[in-house]
Amino acid sequence: MNEEQRLETNQIKNDPKANLDRLKNMDSDELIGKYFQSTYQPPNLKKAKKRLKKDVDIHYDYAVPEDMKGIGQGKKFLIRTYGCQMNEHDSEVMAGLLTDLGYQPTEETEEADVILLNTCAIRENAENKVFGEIGHLKPIKMENPDLIIGVCGCMSQEESVVNRILQKHPFVDMIFGTHNIHRLPQLLKEAMFSKEMVVEVWSKEGDIIENLPKVRKGNIKAWVNIMYGCDKFCTYCIVPYTRGKERSRLPEDIIQEVRHLAAQGYQEVTLLGQNVNAYGKDLEFEYGLGDLLDELRKIDIPRVRFTTSHPRDFDDHLIEVLAKGGNLLDHIHLPVQSGSSDILRIMARRYTREDFLELVGKIREAMPNATLTTDIIVGFPNETDEQFEETMTLMKEVGFESAYTFIYSPREGTPAARWEDNIPMEVKKERLQRLNALVNEQSKASMEKYEGQIVEVLVEGESKKDPDVLSGYTERNKLVNFKAPKSMIGQIVPVKITKAKTWSLDGEFVESTAEVL
Ligand code: 5AD
Ligand code: SF4
């Protein structure tokens, strides 16, 4: 904290209301988060739901706080990441912040001086896993009281989770949320010297902080955030509450980051957002995902992917740009969630089965070879057998090549959680099994088309099962395993497919690139 902030803090402590006026550009959460060192600032989902008009500022001036420099010398950190790619990437930022403080990474819990659990709130079982892990950490903390245990990510944004940790797991040292990751150094310092659990969760999103340090996992593929948050409020989903309102990064900042990654030799970038199709809607000028991809097409990086799309905002210009190909790949992940228009309506997805099929028709016309994959929820409240059958027929009609399938899980604070979760678990499980059997069948069929063909594979490394085998992905996101020299890791190489399995392809390296698929 600098001198100016220290003075302000004292004034705020003496007369917070009067001083709120003076600092009226900040909301009170942000104010407390920024100026109080010893914080107990729990989350509030109701506040998180509000979408304020206040503009988002962008900051380019992040630096390691002077009083924290070198605080991690000779110490180690471990970050466990749960959930989506957004969390994976946030963990890369936290690793960057800790590395800047002098910490080294470790994979061993017993060796770590700081352990962070970057959590996911999307379904109950994701949360149960984290609580299980917190339980496992207790004896380690008892052995090593100097160990700092932090819980962060989406679960921290929920009041119920923070209360449960406070009551049942008081050995946790700090809790922070998705909006104040950049405050990790300060919170860590506070946790080191405080006897109380440090809880700082901003219910309202903060500004965009541009130049946070990152330690990326690997040097072949990279994640690039293009926007934060989600304003769609699908009735089952906790994300708009845990990740705040939609905020887009400026195109020039994204383009510069991708250029930089290309110059460093990265072969692939995946643009990230909860709803990437809403990219640009909050910018002060007309600009969308199509415009951004049209720019990124010109950068000399072999592969550009993006995730996740919302069908509602998938516009014609985007399809037109994607059809230009080049480094824009022929794979679109397009979560449909249900094949029934009635269920889609109560999910507040804002499209019907017919709208979705029309969109798929447009995509297929412009990109006849594109792979389509999806997300589906079964057992949503009131889902009848007939409505579930509509999901099965949609799955076939679209010809999705793969799908992430989920049993509906009520999330406290969302509208759907107030409705009776009235589909019995056996029925939900039976629907999931039938759907998964169909997904497997369609995946296998899509794989079989590749037998005998030559595909281009970005080689990521040794296969998980056999270190003599290399593995990587095709442009259309098919996992390929094949034998080749390790020197090929990081390159895009031609592979002839010899055998199709349900979820992967076996192949052999070939010299020629003729007839590459
Ligand atoms: N229950 C089950 N699945 C959910 N998803 C999001 N919220 C829930 C929930 N409450 C699924 C959706 C989404 C994916 C990331 O997780 O299918 O696309
Ligand atoms: Fe959740 Fe995606 Fe719907 Fe946003 S668009 S509310 S992240 S399912």
Image (tube, rainbow, N blue to C red):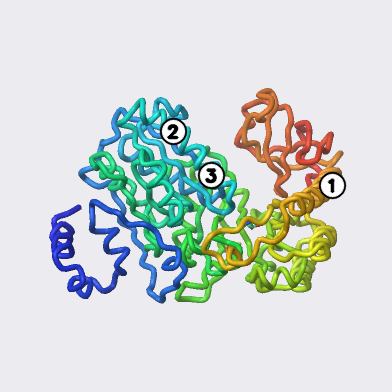
Q: Position of residue 187 (x, y in %)?
A: 30, 47
- Residue at 56% x, 49% y is 84
**Which residue is more in the foreground, 13 or 430?**
430
**In the figure, residue 48 lies in which quadrant?**
bottom left
Q: Residue furthest top?
A: 468
Helix or strand or loop: what does disc 2 sit on? helix
**Earlier residue among tags 1 and 2:** 2
**Earlier residue among tags 3 and 1:** 3
**Is residue 40 at least partly visible in the picture?**
yes
| Label annotation for residue 137 | 2
Specify the amino acid type for callout 3. Tyr
- Residue at 67% x, 67% y is 311
Which of pointers 3 and 2 indicates the residue nearer the eye? 2
| Label annotation for residue 82 | 3
Task: From the viewer's perspective, tell me whether residue 323 is left or right of residue 98.
Answer: right
Helix or strand or loop: what does disc 3 sit on? loop
Contact between labelled residues 2 and 1, with CB atoms less than 8 Å apart: no
- Residue at 36% x, 57% y is 42
Specify the amino acid type for callout 2. Leu
